Amino acid sequence: MKAITYTGNGPSSVLALTERPLPAPGEGEVRVAVRVSGVNPTDWKARANTAPRTEQVPNQDGSGVVDAVGPGVDEARIGERVWLWEAAWQRENGTAQEYVTLPARQAVPLSEGASFDLGASLGIPALTAHRTLTVADGGPARLAPGALSGVTVLVAGGAGAVGNAAIQLARWAGATVLSTVSSPRKAALATAAGAHHTVDYRTQDAAAAIRDLAPDGVHIVVEVAPGANAALDAAVLAPGGVVAFYAQDAGTVAVPPWPSMSRNLRWQGVLVYTVPAAAKDDAVAAVAAAVADGAFRVGEDAGLPLHRFPLERTADAHDAVEGNAIGKVLVDVAP
């Protein structure tokens, strides 16, 4: 079978198209014929910064069809359309290959009518978004329709993959959603995703605009740039609010101490790979339910333009993500 592999860390040129033997699923595993592989920032960062122990196949997310099962897995799963998450986390086998084996729980049934493109766009972004929306004190552990009723969410960078997922999940759960953006183009994308209001921080006084839209403050900030936005976040949070940050834009973050103390604000780090198992299970279940409800979409009209590359151009796909392509980068593994 065809696969993209690398044996040493470095630029995207370390990725090579190779032939590998067809893997057999082990105990508790399924084998998936991969249709589409999704590329995330952590995929290129792992390739660039971490030397693999053996030959490594990149990419955590994907979608496809179960074509074999290992001992302990119901054979009825053969033929099931699935979306995949964390395929390459602490494993040598990511989704940039024609077939991948992985634990059965990491191949989630993909609802009828949901495309393989959508399936490959879930994984890391959607599970991260779910975690950011469920860490507030007294909030729900698992999102569902109505779970965030009465809650105001501010999504920083609503045109990004995680931002897009956070907007769609928050809307599904009943929240009022605001998003900060840096251009009219990104405002249009955040609005298409479902944001009720957008604020262009380059042309507006962002704190004043957000306070006008949410006079009582926002309850959750889904934060992509905690270093740049710490003061803004502290200025617009309601008492007891939380900043859930999932990316690093600076070596340190200057948290404003008095506003944080006086209003009991919380600064919560989120790394999807190390989220507690119970929270991960809740996230997977909620994302699957949102997909089944038709609440998750991809494409330009959903605020998430798609950028496609064939398997042999996976290096270009990694470069596109590293270059901050607006939207979701996908690799077509099979027709």
Image (cartoon, rainbow, N blue to C red):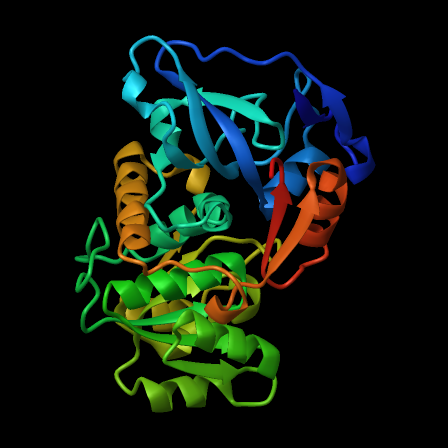
Q: Nearer the viewer, residue 297 or 271?
A: 297
Q: Nearer the viewer, residue 312 or 178?
A: 312
Residue 123 shows in this picture: yes
Question: Which image quarter: residue 59?
Answer: top right
Give how far across and how far down residue 152 sits, in percent. 29, 74
Give how far across and how far down residue 124 sits, in percent. 47, 45
Query: Which residue is pictured at 27% across the width and 17% down the height?
Result: 74
Query: Which residue is pictured at 40% across the width and 78% down the height?
Result: 235
Against 75, is 243 above or below?
below
* For residue 234, side relative to residue 319 (left or right): left
Give how far across and how far down residue 178 sits, in percent. 39, 77
* For residue 44, side relative to residue 166 (left or right): right
Against 80, is 314 above or below?
below
Against 52, is 290 above or below?
below
Quadrant containing the C terminus in the rendered view: top right
Q: Nearer the viewer, residue 93 or 208?
A: 93
Query: Which residue is pictured at 36% across the width and 31% down the height?
Result: 80
Q: Nearer the viewer, residue 294 or 9?
A: 294
Quadrant containing the N terminus in the rendered view: top right
Give how far across and how far down residue 158 sits, in percent. 49, 69
* For residue 104, side relative to residue 229 (left or right): left
Residue 183 shows in this picture: no
How many marks are shown on the rendered structure? 0
